[in-house]
Image: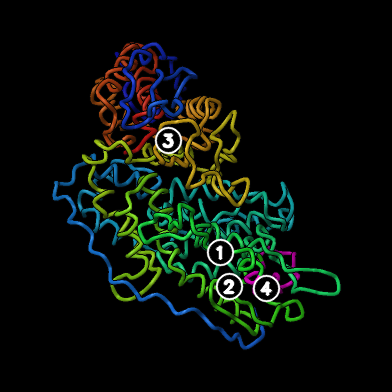
Amino acid sequence: MPDEPSAADDHEVMTIPQPAAQLAQAERRTPRQRIKSHGVLGAATLLAACDSAGGGGSGTGLVSVPAPAPTPTPTPSPTPTTAVLTAQGASRFLAQATMGANRSSIDAVLNTGIAGWIDAQFARPRDMSHWDWLVSKNYNDATNSNNLNGQNGYDPSVWRQAIAGGDPLRQRVALALLDFLVIGINGINLSWRAFAMAAYNDLLLDHAFGNYRDLLGAMTRNAAMGSFLSFLGSRKANPSTGQMPDENYARELMQLFTLGVYQLEQDGSVRMSNGVPLETYTQDDVAQLARVFTGLNLANNDNSTPDRMRLPLVIAASANETGSASFLGGTVSGGGFAAIDGALDIVFRHPNVAPFVSKQLIQRMVTSNPSRAYVGRVAAAFANNGSGVRGDMKAVIRAILLDPEARDEAAALASTTAGRLRDPVQRLTNWARAFGVTSPSDAWAIGDTSNTTQRLGQSIGRAPSVFGFLRPGYAPPGTAMAQAGMTAPEFLIASEQTNLAYVNYMQSLVGGGTGDVKADYAPMMALASDSQKLVDEVNLILAAGQLRSATVTAIRAAVDTIPLTANNATLNRTGVAILLTLASPDYLVLQ
């Protein structure tokens, strides 16, 4: 008799065969995805490279700002498709808006509708903060100040929230923000690194549904950001010694966090003059803005606890520049936080901010190559939420997720440019959320997954530099995508090596978890005697029903090689269906 799912399955060992042969004959993916399936797996081949065809301050803070551009009237979005929301559509939406779908969350979206689900997420209180969780687990014990470079507890905290957090939209938006408002824990030159990074992640979560200007202000006062971009302790110019203010934060604030290097139209296209892109700012703008961010220091000198890592920075008047600073057509003077806030206001009012931020959020959540019209509609929502407010993140999130270009699945599937390669962290959390992964001990022993030969090549909050793991303008060189002017940020960390590492690592997680981090496959195992029902359910939850018929046939054939009379048959059949779906190009590219 075939085995039945039961509590006893908790201790059974999943053995996933090496079914490369069954998939090797699957037809190649159509050029619309620009990816080939080279026959998946074993420990095996995967993804396939890009197709060759395819405290306090001082000073009065006098501010002179350039006249702001008139607040635009919001551009109405095209009428969304009136198609009835399906389970596949709900799953696809959740793949864009969360860290992963499951049957319960799909049903919730079907019950409320997408707009209603978004509103309910906006109304949810925050889950326990990273900081409070670390304290609850006694990671604030003095022995952890520099133990393992002060990183104890960080990885468990981020995986706990990404996998088990009850506020999935907030988690998703905060991760999208972290992808371009980058801090990497290894680049923080402070004690209590886990707490410093936790405070920064909490800042992103706190402001994910707030206002982008407030987020910029909080970032500028954050200890981890001050250390990571080296403006912590920056001093005003000293002509007698030649000392100059640190320019790092001023440059990255403009280049990476708000404006970009070229002037933009509101649809995200680059402004040109005689065929040459117009630059957004000059080196003098950087040098002048850097004068404003001088004198910032940690709130106190008490290193016996991590508490100062989440206190706003303070200004040492002796190191703070009180003279005028002129940049981007505006001027601030007087020093202190009044000058800092005036400077941030000048940056925030720049016309580039709306399209620059909007496009990056669209890329991180929906598609690597949004149309100009899509960017323009979201940028209009950023510039004016309908009530004259600029930078309202709720308006921006609604505009991104409700836009017809995000919601019209049929058009996306028929397009040669729509969609995005799922980044590795989200593939892991997709699996974990789909199949009820828990950690009964609350240890969440997944750890650092940034190793490129044995793990994912990416890990939350562990970017190697301020440029992050993914660069928004990246396209694989020498490919049809690059020749067509398309971008594919996630391909920056996709290679034969990382693809093989991903499959092997996920094989171990799907098969047995890590520590007590394990999935609950009982609902899937109840379907495992019928390969069609099993694969269809996995396809729905993991891949939003986007597996092609040839892929479904190949996965079913692999599942059916395991006879129902075999030991642990339903468990192993389930594992094969899940792993082959996770490895298939149809899943890896979300349309």
Task: Name the residue type under label 1.
Answer: Tyr
Q: Nearer the viewer, mark 4 or mark 1?
A: 1
For mark 1, does the 10 Å Cα neighbourhood hold few (<14), some (14 to 19), or many (20 or more) residues?
some
Q: Is residue 139 visible?
A: yes
x then y, percent, for residue 331: 58, 79
Quadrant placement of the C terminus: top left
Give the residue displayed 32% in from the left and 55% down from the top. Answer: 400
Report the amino acid beneath label 2. Phe
Q: Quadrant of the N terminus?
A: top left
Say what secondary structure mark 1 lies in.
loop
Residue lying furthest right: 240
Separation of marks 4 and 1 at Cα, in angstroms: 16 Å
Q: Earlier in the sequence, mark 4 or mark 1?
A: 1
Is 489 located above or below residue 262 in the figure? above
Count the numbered circles shown: 4
Q: Is residue 160 left or right of residue 137?
A: left
Residue receiving disc 3: 483
Q: Which mark is residue 291?
A: 4
Amino acid on which disc 3 is placed: Gln
Between the C-alphas of marks 4 and 3, the distance is: 41 Å
Question: Callout 4, which amino acid?
Answer: Arg
Asked which secondary structure carries label 2, the reply is: strand
Q: CB under 8 Å between callouts 1 and 3? A: no
**Magenta part of the chain:** 288-308
Residue under the point 63% across and 77% down: 325
Report the residue marked by disc 1: 281
> Mark 2 sits on what residue?
327
* Earlier sequence position, callout 4 versus callout 3: 4
Between 201 and 103, the one lying in front of the other is 201
Where residue 144 appears, as percent x and y from the top left, is 71, 53
The part of the image, by quadrant, that contains residue 230 is bottom right
CA–CA distance between discs 2 and 3?
36 Å
